[in-house]
Image (tube, helix red, strand yellow):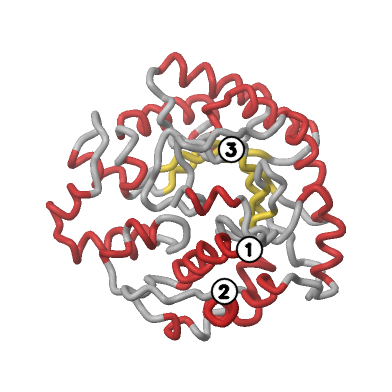
C-alpha cells in the first residue's frame, strides 16, 4: 500500500446521524430516532487529526442534518476556518421554513468562514421536504455566497419534482403511479445513481432484479476502503471509508497510527477480506463461521450484500469494524 491511502480529498465531519427525514436511499441510515451529537471539543480534535492526511483536502460538515444543531455547525465552521481548511456544508433544506431564518443562518455562517453550500435535491429528500424549501435555500444561498458557491445534488430533479408539487412532500409512490415500476426503477437506480448500501437495497430494491451472492464474486473493495476521495469522520471516532456507512477502518483520534498500520498491511480480518475478496468474501466468511444464510430474493448490488452480511455479523460478535452499531438498528 502506498502513502496516498486513507487520504481523502473531501472529508465529511458527521456531527450527528440525527435527521428530520428517514430517506429511503440513505447510506448512513440517518433519521429522527438518533439522539447523539458530537461534543464541541471533539470538533477541534477531529479537524486537527485530519491535518495528518498530509495532502490537501476540504471538509464538508454533514449529518444527518447539521442545521438541527446550529451551534455545533457554527463551531465546526469556525474551527475549520481557523485551521485553514476549506469548508462547506451539506443540507436537506428542511429547516428553510422562511426567508428571514434562511438568510440569517447562511449569512452568519458566511461571516464565520463557510465557503459553499451543497443542497440535496432528489425524489427521496422530496418525499420529506417540500420543494419550495429547497428552492428557497438555493435562492438565498446564492445571494449570500454567490451562485458559483452553491451546489445542488442533483439539479435535474427540480423540474420533475415540481410537476407533482412544490408545496408538499411528494411520496415515492407517486412516481410509480405516474411512470410505472420499470421507468421509476430506471429513474431511481440509473438516473439518480443509487448506492445499494444503507437503506436503499432494502427499501428500493424491489424495483430491480436481485442477484445471488456469487454474482458479486469478482467485486473487491480495495478502492472504496483505501483510496476513496470522499470519506467521513463521525461523532463516535469512526473513520468511515468511501460511502460505507456502518463500516469503520479505525479510530480517527489516532490517525497517524491507523495510517501506519494500513501502510504496513496490518488490517483486521473483516477489512482485509473486503479489500482482497470483496463482499462475496465476507459472505463466505459469515456463512462458514457465523451461520449466515443468503437472502432468497438476492441482492441488488455489492453494497447491499455487504450491508446484509454485516447486519448479521453485528448480532453475532463484537466487531470493532462494524460501527456505529446503531447503524444496523436504523435500516
| Residue at 51% in and 65% down | 312
Which disc, if any, is residue 22?
A: none
Q: Taking 163 as reference, is 251 left or right?
A: right
Relative image position of residue 152 (x, y in whole percent): 44, 43
- Other-residue count near label 3 (Cα within 10 Å), few / some / many at <14 / 14–19 / ≥20: many
For the residues labelled 1 and 2, the Cα–Cα distance comes to: 9 Å
| Residue at 84% in and 52% down | 254
- Other-residue count near label 1 (Cα within 10 Å), few / some / many at <14 / 14–19 / ≥20: few
Of mark 1 and mark 3, the one earlier in the sequence is: 3
For the residues labelled 1 and 3, the Cα–Cα distance comes to: 25 Å
- Other-residue count near label 2 (Cα within 10 Å), few / some / many at <14 / 14–19 / ≥20: some
Q: Nearer the viewer, residue 11 or 29?
A: 29
Which residue matches tag 3?
16
Dot 1 and dot 2 residues touching (CB under 8 Å): yes
Q: Nearer the viewer, residue 316 or 64?
A: 316
Which residue matches tag 2?
290
Dot 3 and dot 2 residues touching (CB under 8 Å): no
Which secondary structure, mark 2?
helix
- In the image, residue 123 sits, relative to residue 99, either above or below, namely below
Which secondary structure, mark 3?
loop
Of mark 3 and mark 2, the one earlier in the sequence is: 3
Of mark 1 and mark 2, the one earlier in the sequence is: 2
| Residue at 28% in and 69% down | 208
Q: Is residue 91 visible?
A: no
Which residue matches tag 1?
317
Quadrant, the N terminus: bottom right
Amino acid at each position: 500500500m502506498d502513502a496516498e491511502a486513507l487520504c481523502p480529498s473531501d472529508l465529511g465531519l458527521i456531527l450527528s446521524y440525527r435527521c428530520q427525514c428517514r430517506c429511503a436511499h440513505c447510506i448512513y441510515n440517518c433519521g429522527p430516532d438518533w439522539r447523539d451529537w458530537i461534543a464541541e471539543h471533539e470538533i477541534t480534535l477531529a479537524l486537527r487529526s485530519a491535518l495528518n492526511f498530509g495532502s490537501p483536502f476540504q471538509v464538508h460538515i454533514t449529518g444527518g442534518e447539521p442545521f438541527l444543531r446550529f451551534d455545533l455547525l457554527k463551531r465546526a465552521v469556525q474551527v475549520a476556518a481557523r485551521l485553514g481548511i476549506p469548508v462547506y456544508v451539506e443540507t436537506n433544506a428542511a429547516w428553510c421554513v422562511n426567508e428571514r431564518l434562511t438568510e440569517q443562518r447562511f449569512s452568519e455562517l458566511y461571516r464565520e468562514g463557510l465557503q459553499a453550500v451543497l443542497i440535496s435535491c432528489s425524489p427521496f429528500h422530496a418525499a420529506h421536504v417540500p420543494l419550495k424549501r429547497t428552492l428557497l435555500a438555493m435562492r438565498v444561498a446564492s445571494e449570500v455566497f454567490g451562485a458559483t458557491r452553491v451546489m445542488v445534488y442533483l439539479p435535474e430533479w427540480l423540474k420533475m419534482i415540481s410537476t407533482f408539487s412544490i408545496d408538499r412532500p411528494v411520496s415515492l409512490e407517486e412516481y410509480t403511479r405516474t411512470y410505472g415500476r420499470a421507468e421509476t426503477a430506471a429513474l431511481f437506480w440509473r438516473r439518480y445513481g443509487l448506492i445499494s448500501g444503507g437503506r436503499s437495497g432494502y427499501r428500493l430494491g424491489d424495483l430491480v432484479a436481485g442477484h445471488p451472492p456469487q454474482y458479486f464474486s469478482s467485486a473487491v473493495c480495495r478502492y472504496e476502503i483505501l483510496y476513496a476521495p470522499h470519506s467521513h469522520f463521525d461523532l463516535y471516532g469512526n473513520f468511515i471509508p468511501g460511502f460505507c456507512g456502518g463500516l469503520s477502518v479505525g479510530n480517527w483520534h489516532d490517525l497517524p497510527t491507523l495510517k501506519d498500520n494500513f501502510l504496513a498491511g496490518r488490517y483486521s480480518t473483516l477489512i482485509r477480506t473486503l479489500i482482497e475478496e470483496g463482499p462475496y468474501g465476507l459472505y463466505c466468511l459469515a456463512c462458514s463461521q457465523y451461520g449466515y444464510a443468503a437472502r432468497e430474493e438476492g441482492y441488488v448490488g455489492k453494497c447491499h450484500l455487504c450491508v446484509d452480511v454485516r447486519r448479521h455479523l453485528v448480532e453475532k460478535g463484537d466487531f470493532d469494524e462494524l460501527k456505529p452499531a446503531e447503524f444496523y438498528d436504523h435500516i
